[in-house]
Image (cartoon, rainbow, N blue to C red):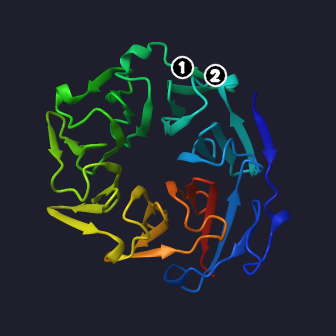
Amino acid sequence: MRRVIQCMVCACMVTALSGITGCGTAPIDNGGITDGSADTFAVYYDTNGLANNVINDLAVDFYRSGLWVATQKGISFFSFKDSTWTTYGTESGLPNLKVTSAAVNLGTVWAGTMSGPASLEGASWKELPDPGVLPNTFVTVITSMPEPDYSLWFGTRGGAVRRSTTGEWSTFTVKEGLSYNDITSIARDKSGNIWVGTIHGLNIFDGAKWTVYISSLPDAAVRAVYADSFGSVWVGTSSGMVEYRGSQQLRYGTFDGLPSPTVNDFVEDFNRVVWAATDFGIAWFDGKAWTKLNLPTQVEGLQITSLASDALTKSLWIGTTSGLVRYRHTVK
């Protein structure tokens, strides 16, 4: 069964001095990023409509004008139009209650779980008709690729799988050249190369062969891979990050402004600012260094698990281990 809950943001407004409770908003001074603007936060919990407070992934849905939130106990959809929450669980067809990832591919919503992926059809979820196309049912990441091919990639505990727009499946494991089968992240750069992070090594696929990078990384365990619009590819590990900018490999850590060396996710927002999610907060990049964003008191210092940028409402969405944060940077 689905749950639909109205989140009354305006009803729980508080001041910056008293903090933020429930789904309230308040102006926050965030240092350099404010630049004379009025910044606001909203924090959402399971009491506001989230399936669970532990968030694993976020995906903006421009087709439905909303945000998908993958959690430890189901997946929730937040509508930008009326600020309502709709939550789905196993009773709605999800293979497993633990939803690890979410993606929107050509209008179809996908959810990855510990027991395989499912796609949303109407008000219910449908499992893959042929689950045998996956090397492992534990889906760790789902990435929808942009034009021109619009393919869908699944990362699992047993390798990576590509699904073409015509429904053809291709599997990639250590047999095909991957450094390891446990996939953590997948992205595609501006040249069309596929970057795959694993718990032991970074892999780049040029369409014909895989190239493996391990020793050049701050840590062999890759936690996040992200390609921005400038042409850089960002790789986050447990001991810092690397920006692959053309032929350059630039390293960043806590000495460069990161709140923590453990980097879990990246996103480029609607202002083309790159953000990094770490184990102790979030930071933004000015082209040279990172600046930490001061979050509301009840989520300050928490592990940031996932990020998403919403150009429709000019919001940055921040997933944590205890709630969802919406950050809006409004220029006066």
Residue 244 bears which disc, if any? none
Residue 312 on image: x %, y %: 59, 57
Disc with the residue nearer the chain's start (2 vs 1): 2
Label 2 element class: loop
Residue at x 36% of width, y 72% of height: 254
Identify the amino acid type marked 2.
Answer: Gly
Residue 206 on image: x %, y %: 18, 40
Residue at x 45% of width, y 70% of height: 283
Which quadrant of the view contains residue 259?
bottom left
Residue 61 appears in the rendering? no
Check if mark 2's residue and mark 1's residue have beta carbons within 8 Å.
yes
Identify the amino acid type marked 1.
Answer: Glu
Residue 186 on image: x %, y %: 34, 42
Quadrant location of the C terminus in the rendered image? bottom right
Dot 1 surroundings within 10 Å: few (below 14), some, or many (20 or more)?
some
Judge left or right: residue 273 versus residue 14: left
**How far apart are labels 2 and 1 at the CA level?**
8 Å
The residue at which mark 2 appears reads as 93
The residue at which mark 1 appears reads as 127
Label 1 element class: strand
Judge left or right: residue 32 versus residue 154: right
Residue lying at the far bottom in this picture: please name it: 36
Residue 33 on image: x %, y %: 51, 79
